Amino acid sequence: MRYMMTYDLMETVRNTNQWLGATALSMASYPVFSALPNPALSWMAAWGEVTERTYQRMVVKPAWGIRTFTCEDGKDHLVDITTVVERPFGDLIHFKVNGREEQPRKVLLVAPMSGHYATLLRSTVKSLLVNCEVYVTDWHNARDIPVSAGKFDIEDYTLYLVDFMRELGPDTHVVAVCQPVPLTLAATAYLAEREPDAQPSSLTLIGGPVDPDATPTEVTDFGRRVTMGQLEETMIQQVGFKYPGVGRKVYPGLLQLASFMSMNGERHTKAFLDQIQRVSRGEASDHDAHNRFYDEYLAVMDMTAEFYLSTVERIFKKREIARNVFTVNGHKVDFSKITDVAVKTVEGAKDDISAPGQCVAALDLCTGLPESKKASHLEPGAGHYGIFAGRSWRDNIRPLVINFMNANSRSTPARKPASKPANKNTAA
């Protein structure tokens, strides 16, 4: 009950702040005040508008917002988001462009389960839709999953990925972003040993902690400092009575959001103060740069307690993936069994979450894979977000990834890249 009261208290604080923002906006916008122009009232209304929107977005799952897509025929085609595989903790969804021929590249985009929804990869999905059939792992908010659905830890996560890969078949190109990188590698190795015919054609790993100790960051330092008992005591709460998952132990998204924002507190504070000034001057809009970013960034989801704790303990503390001792349902996963799935790693030189060195460690684990099927890319000047959704992704990384898929496709003949990729070693 103590954990449940804490969860409800956090929701009460969030709800109160949303109400305060709405109240300030309503009061400062009262028509009678128009007769007495006062800059303080304009600022109060602006503060209320920004505050209400900020706290409201924390409990709203963003829409994908991908309704149409312009194809080579110059026409706008409707995009249907269909569920291919439905599971209690996450679905496999497909972005189907109606009226367009099926594209030669089938891409499974593995979204992170690290506090944000899969919609964080919206721009990544849009960029791949140009010439790919895109499938995405759409993870569910743990607060909405009844306790009767059971547990969900990193082994269950890995088995979900195994099922998704098996469903899509061996002509699939898998792209994993951030948190799921080590578990996607494990799922591939699991299939390589048990169902080799179901392995994907290629595996692109973007900015993930395969070996967290390769390059320490603030995230890895935190994982080293705290004990598992401390984490369970301070980070784990029970879902309150307001949601279907009442009683389920979770790592709340609001706590994760607080951690994210504290890492760059000054930058976020300045961003909100600047937005209040813009609103007060009438220079802001509903879909301006600030709102587009923070509508997504502030929308957070809860993770199951067992997933969060097992991630910290087994990926970061015990380094089971990095040491090649990871087990799934009692079966030891052996990365040397990956022998014909081309693997490419992508890192950002200024990534402060998964620093350079943590992801490329995956190539050293694949001892059974020929060097000709290994590739790596370090993007100069790119941070964590930029390597999968920013300008660096669009201008430099995406073309390299597409070339890598073309060169390692099982279903279509490999096409020679238009230009030489800027890789340390290139699978072609």
Image (tube, rainbow, N blue to C red):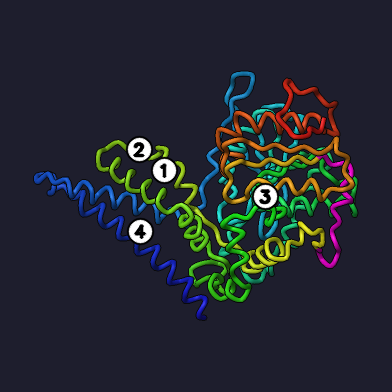
Quarter of the C terminus within the rendering: top right
**Amino acid identity at mark 3:** Gly
Q: Residues within 10 Å of mark 4 (few under 14, many from 20)?
A: many
First of labels 2, 3 by sequence position: 3
Quarter of the image where one finds residue 157: bottom right
Quarter of the image where one finds residue 75: top right
Q: Position of residue 243 (x, y in %)?
A: 52, 66
First of labels 3, 1 by sequence position: 3
Q: Position of residue 131 (x, y in %)?
A: 69, 28
Q: Residue at x 73, y 45 (%)?
A: 360
Q: Which residue is mark 4?
A: 18
**Amino acid identity at mark 2:** Ser
Q: Which residue is mark 2?
A: 285
**Would you say the residues marked 2 and 1 are in contact, meaning their CB atoms lie under 8 Å apart?**
yes
Whole-angstrom CA distance, mark 3 to mark 1, is 27 Å
The furthest residue to the left: 35
**Would you say the residues marked 4 and 1 are in contact, meaning their CB atoms lie under 8 Å apart?**
no
Q: Nearer the viewer, mark 4 or mark 1?
A: 1
